[in-house]
């Protein structure tokens, strides 16, 4: 599941574009490395810092997503800041955010 995918193409690797047609993930010519994951079970703000982000293009993926949930991800200075908000449309189960580079 790609966090901001407008479309996904799978041939020799994976390519993901956002709604503005900007390529946000391309594993067809580089090796993708997942550094780790964080488990999210409530709304709030979560940060992940890793110096290895500087060795490629950072990305994140979620293992599930629920209607009414808003996830805002901001990347700056080798740190991802994830803010999760519930729009009041129901509850959700815990999920994971995987992060790494390509």
Image (cartoon, helix red, strand yellow):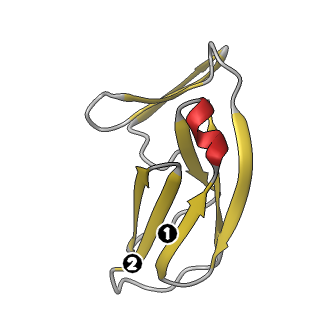
Residue 47 appears in view? yes
Residue 23's disc is none
Image depth: mark 2 or mark 1 in front:
2
Check disc 1 and report its element: helix, strand or loop.
loop
Q: Quick check: 72 left or right of 91?
A: left
Q: Which of marks 1 and 2 precedes in the sequence?
A: 1
Residue 67: horizontal and vertical position, in percent? 42, 69
User: Residue 57 appears at what percent x and percent y?
Assistant: 53, 32
Q: Quadrant of the C terminus?
A: top right
Label 2 sits on a secondary structure element that is strand
Q: Can residue 100 be seen in this view?
A: no
Q: From the viewer's perspective, tell me whether residue 18 is left or right of residue 15.
A: left
Picture layout, residue 31 above or below residue 5: above
Tell me where residue 96 sits by quadrant: bottom right
Residue on which disc 1 sits:
66
Q: In which quarter of the image is residue 23?
A: top left
Q: Residue at x 42, y 51 (%)?
A: 76
Residue 8 x %, y %: 50, 30
Dot 1, crowdedness within 10 Å: few (<14), some or many (≥20)?
few
Per the rendering, the mark at residue 85 is: 2
- Mark 2 surroundings: few (<14), some (14-19) or many (≥20) residues within 10 A: some
For the point 55% across and 84% down, the residue is 42
* Picture coordinates of residue 101, whole percent (x, y): 62, 36
Determine the residue positioned at 42% across, 71% down.
83
Q: From the viewer's perspective, is 35 left or right of 69?
A: right
- Of the pair 24 and 8, the residue shown nearer to us: 24
User: Residue drawn at (43%, 51%), measured in percent from left and top?
Assistant: 75
Distance in Å between CA atoms under marks 2 and 1:
11 Å
Q: Marks 2 and 1: CB-CB under 8 Å?
A: no
């Amino acid at each position: 599941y790609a966090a901001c995918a407008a479309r996904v193409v799978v041939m020799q690797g994976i390519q993901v574009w956002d709604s503005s047609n900007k390529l946000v993930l391309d594993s067809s010519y580089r090796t993708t490395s997942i550094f780790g994951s964080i488990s999210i079970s409530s709304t709030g703000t979560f940060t992940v810092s890793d110096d290895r982000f500087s060795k490629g293009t950072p990305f994140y993926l979620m293992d599930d997503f629920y209607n009414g949930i808003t996830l805002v991800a901001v990347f700056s200075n080798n740190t991802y800041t994830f803010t999760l908000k519930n729009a009041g449309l129901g509850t959700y189960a815990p999920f994971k955010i995987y992060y790494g580079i390509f």
